[in-house]
Amino acid sequence: MIEGEALPQPPGLRAWLLVTAPASAWQARLGRWFRAWTSFRRNGLGIAGLAIVLALVVMAIAAPLIASPEAVTQQALAARLQPASWAHPFGTDELGRDIFARIVFGARITLTIVFLVAAIVVPIGLCIGLPAGYLGGAVDAVLMRVTDIFLAFPRLILALAFAAALGPGIENVVIAIALTAWPPYARLARAETLTWRRAEFVLAAEIQGASSLRILRTQILPLCLPSVIVRLTLDMAGIIVTAAGLGFLGLGAQPPAPEWGAMVSTGRQVLLDQWWVATIPGLAIFIVSLGFNLLGDGLRDASDARGG
Amino acid sequence: MSATGAAGLAGATGGDRLRVAGSILRRIAGVFVSVVLTFLGLTCVTFVIGRVVPIDPVLAIVGDHASDEVYQRVRAEIGLDLPIYAQYGRYLVKVLHGDFGTSVITSRPVLEDLLRVFPATIELSALALVIGIALGIPAGVIAAAHRGRWQDQLIRFASLLGYSMPVFWLGLVGLLLFYAKLGWVAGPGRVDTGFDDIVEPVTGLLTIDSLLAGETGVFWNALGHIVLPASILGYLSLAYVARMTRSFMLGQLGQEYILAAMAKGLSPARIIWVHALGNIWVQLVTVIALTFGSLLEGAVLTETVFAWPGLGLYMKNSLYNADLNAVLGGTILVGTVYILLNMLSDLTYPLVDPRARRTA
């Protein structure tokens, strides 16, 4: 820190971010983000993925500005199954509802599912993986055995059985996916913890008398988060496709909610004559899942480059 | 998956036959224990699912007009007055005897139904797997050999597309394009109705049965039906197989023995396709097993789209009719096959890889 103050500071935000001796933890953190961004920025496909994901988020937040909320459920049987036009950019479905409006508002459902699954899966994975890696021994053996058991479960089928028992609905789709999606995070957190367990700063904290919980929370958890985030981004696509699959089977959000998978399912009846009813919501699922995959790939490449 | 083998006898020499045999036995025992535990876990989950259903199973049998006495007697008969672990024990014994209860829709034992529909799923998944392997492994090898160049980019992008596509949507688009618009393939279903029940099932795989019976008409018709769903599933598994093959190959190509082979003057083709590829078969076995597992579970969606009369369609129909016995029976069947595939890939390690055989 003293050296940092002694050195002449080159002006400019970029230099402030890239300084080798940051004056505060806050500056160091921003600088780390900036370095990750500079290495990520060079990846064209990754940027495309980021753009798709951002577009999805904006679409979900600003949905009422893009399309009218009434159009989502408003039926107009006289205008059913219309092809694309200025009034209905993606045509209308079998009840005359505007497909464009339903796609726009469907983004909210998709994002809700993804967000809730992430909010459940990451804490569970960390709560199991961190102690397993740090404490080792019997704790590790038991926790990892449980993880292995869940890892060997067929995800979609189990989610299906859960949803079948609990009844259809978004909450149950979230629970079903979360219950089968956490094991990789536990493994990842454990592997990361193992690499840091014997690090000097952890030993220093131990000598100072910090409790295991405190060490995990303040020393090890922050180091695990980047790889967890990369993994989560890559998983998002799978979660979206699984959720859409459950929606397609009629187990997700119930009508008239504009869930993309369910929209594909109802469009099946008119597939051969009015192709857009089924294919356009499917295209939306595909583009969003592609976006998350591209973004995750880019993030992984960037973090690999940083790691060596 | 189990670390018992790897941690074993790294320094075993050729003479220590006994110790090597012991370590292999220990490895097999380890795999066996994990299979049993996973199976117990699976049945635990299906047991819990069966219990949380908001339907009173006693009421479902006696109806809501039954007297309290009858209610209590039936409750005791189906074992609901026992402690929960005893109920699970009874459930486990039933499952191990293949007793999944009776299907509400077909009013046949669930196991009978499952065995009847499962071959159709196996037929579709196996063909898809063959397509996925036959194209995915070469694609992955080529991508790794041309790392960073257009071949790599192309294959990487194609597999990323496959990764991102919802299978049910791709199936619908495929039907729309190749069946409705172009007429290249036959539509949904396994054969045209006119060809139903001509061939007596022997293996349960219609394409093979029809050939065995010499019914070429049925064979070509069945082939026309299976080619589209199998290609679509094959593409999706190709995406995974190619991606994994590429990363395994990159791991090999960076090693010194490749450099040594190049210094010796071997042709690049030989180094890549014989030396490097030869060393990743072990890892590929695991990938193939996992791909097959994911094909089986993905069957629920594909079979719904293609009206393919297999396990997936059966489970979906049971789901719609709240036939929980059938759904849970299907779950246990797919889960068990899944667990066994995992076990198989763990056990084939020492068979395919001489290094694992010698040192494990």
Image (tube, coloured by chain):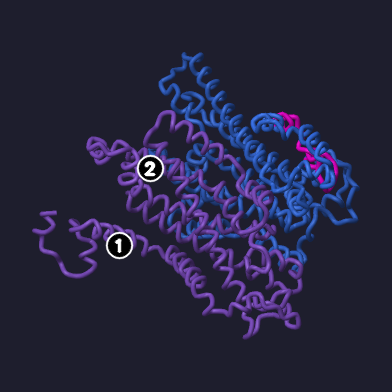
Chain colours: A purple, B blue
Looking at the rendered structure, the number of numbered marks drawn on it comes to: 2
**Residue B284 is covered by the magenta coloring:** no
- The image quarter containing residue A254 is bottom right
Q: What element does badge 1 sit on?
A: helix
Magenta range: B92-114
Residue lying furthest bottom: A86
In the image: residue A244, left or right of residue A209: right
Q: Position of residue A235 (x, y in %)?
A: 51, 54
**Numbered circle sitting on residue A131:** none
**Numbered circle sitting on residue A34:** 1
Q: Position of residue B16 (x, y in %)?
A: 47, 14
Residue at figure coordinates x 25%, y 40% from the top left: A205
Q: Chain of mark 2?
A: A
Q: Earlier in the sequence, mark 1 or mark 2?
A: 1
- The image quarter containing residue A273 is bottom right
Q: Residues within 10 Å of mark 2 (few under 14, many from 20)?
A: many
Residue at figure coordinates x 60%, y 72% from the top left: A103
Q: Residues within 10 Å of mark 1 (few under 14, many from 20)?
A: some
Q: Position of residue A209 (x, y in %)?
A: 25, 36
Please state which amino acid type lies under the numbered disc 2: Glu
In the image: residue B61, left or right of residue A260: right
Give the CA separation, mark 1 to mark 2: 23 Å
Q: Position of residue B106 (x, y in %)?
A: 85, 46
State the residue in front, A30 or A146: A146
**Residue B103 is covered by the magenta coloring:** yes
**Numbered circle sitting on residue A192:** 2
Please state which amino acid type lies under the numbered disc 1: Phe
Q: Chain of mark 1?
A: A
